[in-house]
Amino acid sequence: MRTLILSIMLLASPSSHANPAPTLQSLLDKHAQAMGPVSKVQSRRLRMRLIGLAPFALPLVVEASRPALMRKDVTIQGSVQVTAYDGKQSWMTDPFVPGGMKPAPLPALEAKALADEADFDGILVGSTAKGVKLAYAGPATVDGKPAHALGVTRADGSAATIWLDAGSFLEVKRTQPGLVMGAMKSIDIFSSDYRLVDGVRIAHRMEIGLTGAKDRMSIVVDAAELNVRIDPARFARPQVK
């Protein structure tokens, strides 16, 4: 009888029914499966709107190609501000500063931020080769929904946290250092409204703000094109005679 009672107690114990903690690799595998065949994507062009940065929405076009090329064109009252990374250096033109139409190198902090962002596949893919360390940081909640937190440490020592939704395994939140008014601060990036584009899931809405702040800037994707032809010269810094 005593043995039977102990057996019943063990069966009824909450710990015996607890789901085992997922491994980091299992989460990465499920995330990759949820995102779709991103390895087949060689280039992309996103047409977006920035909301909250100005009294009116700002059109933004972001073009990217493998392995790490990126260009952003922001239209402000008919003038276009360009920031780009050609795989080695970052540069910009800015019609709103004296002499700004002459292509110039980005300041160091901005250049690094753009180079990090230009990583075509993102930080969760091929992390070891990039010198990035990932770790499972445990279960969490994002906007009241269960999620899994991943700790990220870049090769330069900077840290970030990425949250994957526990049901879809898509990224729903990221906290990382970001350049705000010329200084590095902790920012939150919320991703949502994922849609299939040629079999790949792309977030069509992102909200960005200082960590913990209620005020956020929104980025809304109006159109997404994958494997679109982009002239490599688009990313290169123009030579001015």
Image (cartoon, rainbow, N blue to C red):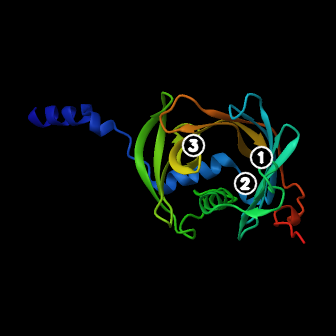
Q: Earlier in the sequence, mark 2 or mark 1?
A: 2
Say what amino acid the circle numbered 1 marks: Gly
Residue at the image position 68 percent from the left and 31 percent from the top: 52
- Element type where label 2 sits in the image: loop
Q: Is the residue 138 above or below the residue 109 in the image?
A: above
- Element type where label 3 sits in the image: loop
- Place of residue 173 in the rendered image (x, y in percent of width and height, measured from the top left): 55, 40
The residue tagged 2 is 37
Residue at the image position 62 percent from the left and 52 percent from the top: 32
Of the pair 195 and 64, the residue shown nearer to us: 64
- Place of residue 191 in the rendered image (x, y in percent of width and height, measured from the top left): 62, 38
State which quarter of the image contains the C terminus: bottom right
- Find residue 199 and name its label: 1
Q: Is residue 55 left or right of residue 230?
A: left
Say what amino acid the circle numbered 3 marks: Phe
State which quarter of the image contains the N terminus: top left
Callout 3: few (<14), some (14-19), or many (20+) C-alpha neighbours within 10 Å? many
- Place of residue 146 in the rendered image (x, y in percent of width and height, measured from the top left): 47, 34
Is residue 163 at least partly visible in the picture? no
Of the pair 153 and 137, the residue shown nearer to us: 153
Discs 3, 2 touching: Cβ within 8 Å: no
Discs 2, 1 touching: Cβ within 8 Å: yes
Of the pair 7 and 155, the residue shown nearer to us: 155
Q: Earlier in the sequence, mark 3 or mark 1?
A: 3
State how far apart marks 3 and 1 are (Cα). Answer: 16 Å
The residue tagged 3 is 169
Quarter location, residue 168: top right
Q: Is the residue 148 above or below the residue 4 in the image?
A: below
- Element type where label 1 sits in the image: loop
